[in-house]
C-alpha cells in the first residue's frame, strides 16, 4: 500500500465505528498518525489498538462533537500529541428520530442539528485554525446522499446534511487561497452499525433502492475520502462527491 500520508497528522470524528473507523484504519495504513475522536472512548481505543497492531500510529480522544468546548479540546489534543494537523474528517453523526416534520420534537430536532450540523462548524473552526498554522491542509465533511435529496421522515437529518454541503462550499471558497481544501462526501446507504437496528425487510428494501443492488461498504466510502484528502486531489475543493451505487442518478 502506498504511504502517501506519511508525515501527516489526521483527525477523524466518529472514528470508532463504521465509516469513520474505516477512514482511520486506511489513513494509518497509508502512513498518517491518526487521532480517533469519538463519544465512545473505549471503542476509539480499540481502533487505536488495531492500528498499532498493524504497525501504525494513532491516539484516541473522547469528544462530544455537539459541544464546541469539547471539540476545541479534541483538536488541541491532536496538536499536543502530534504537533500539527494536516487532514481532518468530520464524520461523527447520528440517524435521529423518524417522523414527519410536524411530529418532530424540539429535542430530537436540536439533537440531530447539534451532532450532524453544528458539530461540523465547531470542528472546522478549530481544524482550520490549526491547519493555517501549519501552512494548509484538507478537510472532508461526511454528508450523505441526503445532502442533495430527501428521504421520508428524516427532516432534521436531511436539513443537517444539506447544511453540511453548504458549509463545505462556504469554507472552501474562504480558504482556497490559504492552502486548505474542503470537500463533502455523500454516501448512499452504507452497511454500518448505524443501520444495524433495521429489520430485514427494511434493509432489503434499502439495498434494492440502489441501482447497484446492494448497500455500500465503509471501505468504499473511505477510499473516496482518502482520495479527496490526498495530494492527488489538489485541484478539488468546495465540491460534493457521492458514493452511492447510482442512488441519486435515478
Ligand atoms: P456509526 O454509527 O457506525 O458510527 C458513528 C460514530 O460516531 C460512532 O462511533 C459514534 O459513537 C460516533 N458519534 C455519535 N455521536 C457522536 C457525538 N456526539 N460525538 C462524537 N462522536 C459521536 O455510523 P456510520 O454509518 O459510520 O456514519 C458515519 C457518518 O456517515 C455519519 O455522519 C452518517 O450520517 C454518515 N452517513 C452514513 C450512512 C449510512 O448509511 N451508514 C449514509 C450516509 C451518510
Image (tube, rainbow, N blue to C red):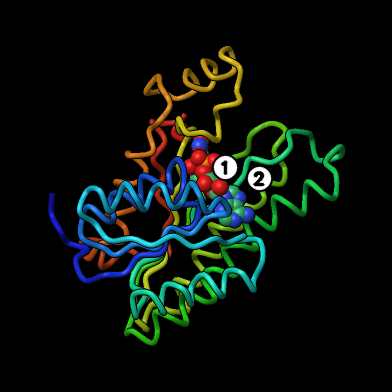
Mark number for residue 157?
Answer: 2
Could you tell me which residue is drawn at 72 percent across and 42 percent down? 155
Closer-to-camera residue (47/160): 47
Left or right relative to 121: residue 5: left
Closer-to-camera residue (248/117): 117
User: Would the CB of label 1 be found within 8 Å of ligand 1?
Assistant: yes
Q: Position of residue 120 (x, y in %)?
A: 56, 63
Secondary element type, mark 2: helix
Mark number for residue 227?
Answer: none
Left or right relative to 232: residue 63: right
Number of marks in picture:
2
Question: If you read the primary sequence from the N terminus, does the residue marked by circle 2 or circle 1 appear first?
Answer: 1
Name the residue beneath numbered marker 1: 146
Could you tell me which residue is drawn at 53 percent across and 57 percent down? 165
Q: Position of residue 7 (x, y in %)?
A: 21, 71
Cα–Cα span, label 2 and label 1? 8 Å
Q: Is residue 35 above or below residue 185?
A: below
Q: Position of residue 89 (x, y in %)?
A: 43, 59
Whether residue 205 is visible to the viewer of this picture, yes or no, is yes
Left or right relative to 93: residue 127: left
Secondary element type, mark 1: helix
> Do callouts 2 and 1 mark residues in contact (Cβ within 8 Å)?
yes
Q: Is residue 214 above or below residue 129?
A: above
User: Would the CB of label 2 be found within 8 Å of ligand 1?
Assistant: yes
Left or right relative to 159: residue 179: left
Whether residue 161 is visible to the viewer of this picture, yes or no, is no
Judge the density around disc 1: few (<14), some (14-19), many (≥20) Cα neighbours within 10 Å.
many
> Which of the 4 image quadrants contains residue 215?
top left
Amino acid at each position: 500500500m502506498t504511504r502517501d500520508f506519511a508525515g501527516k497528522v489526521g483527525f477523524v470524528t466518529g472514528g470508532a465505528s463504521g465509516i469513520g473507523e474505516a477512514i482511520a484504519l486506511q489513513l494509518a495504513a497509508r502512513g498518517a498518525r491518526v487521532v480517533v475522536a469519538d463519544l465512545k472512548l473505549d471503542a476509539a481505543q480499540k481502533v487505536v489498538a488495531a492500528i498499532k497492531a498493524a504497525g501504525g500510529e494513532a491516539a484516541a480522544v473522547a469528544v462530544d462533537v455537539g459541544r464546541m468546548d469539547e471539540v476545541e479540546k479534541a483538536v488541541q489534543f491532536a496538536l499536543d500529541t502530534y504537533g500539527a494537523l494536516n487532514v481532518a474528517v468530520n464524520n461523527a453523526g447520528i440517524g435521529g428520530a423518524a417522523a414527519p416534520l410536524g411530529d418532530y420534537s424540539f429535542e430530537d430536532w436540536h439533537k440531530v442539528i447539534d451532532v450532524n450540523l453544528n458539530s461540523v462548524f465547531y470542528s472546522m473552526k478549530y481544524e482550520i485554525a490549526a491547519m493555517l498554522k501549519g501552512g494548509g491542509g484538507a478537510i472532508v465533511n461526511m454528508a450523505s446522499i441526503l445532502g442533495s435529496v430527501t428521504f421520508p421522515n428524516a427532516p432534521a437529518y436531511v436539513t443537517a446534511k444539506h447544511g453540511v454541503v453548504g458549509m463545505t462550499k462556504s469554507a472552501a471558497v474562504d480558504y482556497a487561497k490559504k492552502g486548505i481544501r474542503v470537500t463533502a462526501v455523500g454516501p448512499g446507504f452504507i452497511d454500518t452499525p448505524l443501520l444495524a437496528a433495521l429489520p430485514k425487510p427494511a434493509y432489503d428494501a434499502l439495498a434494492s433502492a440502489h441501482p447497484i443492488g446492494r448497500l455500500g461498504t465503509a471501505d468504499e466510502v473511505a477510499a473516496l475520502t482518502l482520495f479527496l484528502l490526498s495530494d492527488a486531489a489538489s485541484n478539488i475543493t468546495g465540491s460534493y462527491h457521492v458514493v452511492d451505487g447510482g442512488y441519486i442518478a435515478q
